[in-house]
Image (tube, helix red, strand yellow):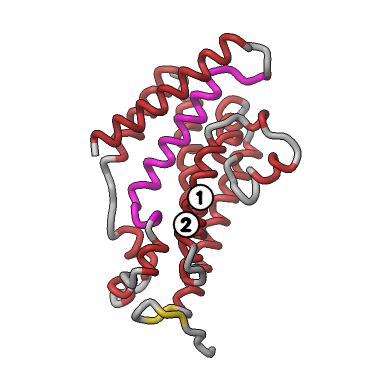
Amino acid sequence: SLIALFGSLLNSAIWLVFWWVFFKRFPNISEWQFVHLFTIWAVLNVALALVSVFYNVYKIPAIINEGKLECYLVRPKNALFHLLVARMQLIDLLEAAIWFISFIILKPELPAILLFLLMSAISAAVIHGFLLILGSLGFFLKSADGIGTELYNALITFSTYPNWIFRGAANWIIFTVIPAGFISYDPVQGIYNQGYFWILGSLGFGILLNVIGCIIFSRGLKYFETGNTFVLKAD
């Protein structure tokens, strides 16, 4: 809704003001500038808006546990495709447009704009793949909904911070278990440093997550049975 959209934009604005004040007071704390932090937030919010279009990817565990998956199984293949496109929220594209326009105002250069669009799409693929994996675990874990919510919240939280605040094991975690680094650090490298290694790395990782998610979902269907029970089917 428009109220939720306004609330999301207001929350982002408050955090951006915080980072603007931070970089004004500590301009030499790193090689990053406020424009880099704004880019992180813009890429993240555009990516989230793109993912939210396929709203059911957030609801896969609930759909499985509540026995609502059957209505997608009776449709022509592929069940996952029908599940994802069954409920779409196009209103979120308005938020994506607002962030995109804001980035253009901040960085009115065609190469940067094109790279912004590319990195936003790649970040959306990473988030979507991550959600798909977490959601597909609902076939095997009754608590997948709660676990998935916590991990998703951690992903979004860590994605709003620059990677230089993480050290040691934490830096590895945000590029593996909770792949926030692919949504925060990689877009900045790709857009401002033309880091094609980071672009390709993010693209490959996003594809990998979605492939793994599709495999887990497909395997989970073998254990799913009408009435929301789980059985092991002999091959």
Residue sitting at x 30%, y 34%: 5
* Amino acid under disc 1: Glu
Reply yes or no: does residue 232 show up in magenta.
no
Q: Are marks 2 and 1 in contact (CB under 8 Å)?
A: yes
Q: In the picture provided, is 34 more to the left or to the right than 14?
A: right
**Label 2 vs label 1: CA separation?**
6 Å
At x 37%, y 70%, the residue is 78
**Image x and y of residue 2, in percent:** 24, 35
**Which residue is at a point 65% across and 49% down the rendered structure image?**
176
Name the residue that disc number 1 marks: 150
Of 106 and 22, which appears nearest the observer?
A: 22
Q: Is residue 35 magenta?
A: yes
Name the image quarter holding the C terminus: bottom right
Percent across and percent down for residue 212 are 55, 62
- Residue nearest the observer in this picture, 37 or 206: 37
In the rendered view, would you say 64 is above or below 46?
A: below
Q: Could you tell me if residue 122 is visible in this image?
A: no
- The percent position of residue 145, horizontal first and vertical second, equals 45, 59
Left-right relation of 177 to 183? right
The residue at 50%/65% (across/down) is: 137
The residue range painted magenta reads 30-58
Quadrant of res 77: bottom left
Q: Classify residue 41 as left or right of residue 49.
A: right
Categorize mark 2 by other alpha carbons within 10 Å: few (<14), some (14-19), many (20+): few
Callout 2, which amino acid?
Answer: Gly
Residue 146's label in the rendered image is 2
Q: Could you tell me which secondary element the residue under label 2 belongs to?
A: helix
Quadrant that contains the N terminus = top left
Residue at disc 1, secondary structure? helix
